[in-house]
Image (cartoon, rainbow, N blue to C red):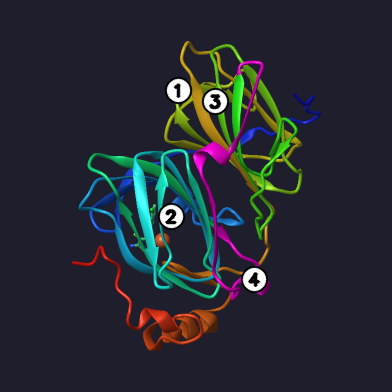
Amino acid sequence: QENLQEPRLVSRKFLAKPQREGVGALVRRSIGRFELKYFDPFLVLDEFSVAAPAGFPDHPHRGFETVTYMLQGAVTHEDFEGHKGTIEAGDLQWMTAGRGIVHSEMPVAQGIQKGLQLWINLASQHKMVEPRYQEMLSKDIVEVIKDGIMVRVIAGEALGIKSPIYTKTPTMYLDFTLKPGSHLQQLVPKSWNAFVYILEGEGIFGNKKSQPTTSHHILLLGSGDGLEAWNKSSKVLRFILVGGEPLNEPVVQLGPFVMNTQEEIDQTIDDFENYTNGFEKARHWKSDSVV
Ligand SMILES: Nc1ccc(F)c(C(=O)c2c[nH]c3ncc(Cl)cc23)c1F
Ligand SMILES: [Fe+3]
């Protein structure tokens, strides 16, 4: 446990409400909604829930990374290179789309599949890198338990444990579960933008006199050296703490294409329509999910 010199206070707070996305899927979008279009380097945070036959059929990405973290059920992803895999509850997929990916992300079993998808922007010099995946099975994600706090270290470092995930844009992604009565102090690099997204229960963040916050809320954290949180309720509190180094670059976004200038977006549309500069394999590819 750290002793924070200057705990970050909550600067903004939003309730993420369900909206339609994909084909028949629902997402609670916290970052990426009109009041919070961009929280540098984060473009989107979706808490998704989807049941077959709904899902996210064939779609492209260019210029950023997606981090899919399954909370319940499973999603099968399949891309135009022939990569195919299933992300089960507790598993994680870190996809660097770079110059271009076309893939589908569809629920596997019956029933509601839930998870989080975070979109992390890439610096201009990395936007056209070759696509790559880093997948972590639930059993490989390091969990640390201390003083009533359990943390799953997805990216970055907590309680002395470092994740093996290599993030192009320096990022921390920690999944905390606090037992009733526990108190957390977690360092966050001072220059990074950081937020909390609550998944379960209610917690007090930043100022210990503030009102508890409940699930589906995002809390943007102001300046300081870390996060302080308390669970003063009788139930378990679960939330993610995500931080990233701001890129401080212009963002021009058209849905799943995120570049730095309008010309680069025009070029991206041209590449996607003419199957060039990384979209070559999209010409003859359709996922199995396309009926
Ligand atoms: N229409 C559209 C356009 C572009 C997209 F990238 C997507 C898309 O794939 C998703 C957007 N939120 C998500 N949450 C979780 C998962 Cl598994 C997928 C998505 C999509 F649906
Ligand atoms: Fe996708």
Q: Secondary structure at mark 2?
A: helix
> Which dot marks residue 34?
2
**Which callout, 4 or 2, points to the residue nearer the camera?**
4
Q: Which kind of residue does numbered mark 3 sit on?
A: Thr
Kind of residue sitting beneath label 1: Gly
Q: Position of residue 174 (x, y in %)?
A: 60, 38
Closer to the chain start, of discs 3 and 4, is 4
Q: Residue at x 81, y 29 (%)?
A: 5
Is 252 situated above or below 234? below
How far apart are labels 1 and 2 at the CA level?
A: 26 Å
Which residue matches tag 3?
A: 177
Q: Secondary structure at mark 3?
A: strand
Q: If the image is split into quadrants, where does the N terminus sit? A: top right
**What residue sits right under mark 4 in the picture?**
126
Instruction: Give how far across and how far down residue 137 sits, in percent.
Output: 51, 44
| Amino acid type for the residue under numbered disc 4 | His
State which mark lies toward you, 1 or 4.
4
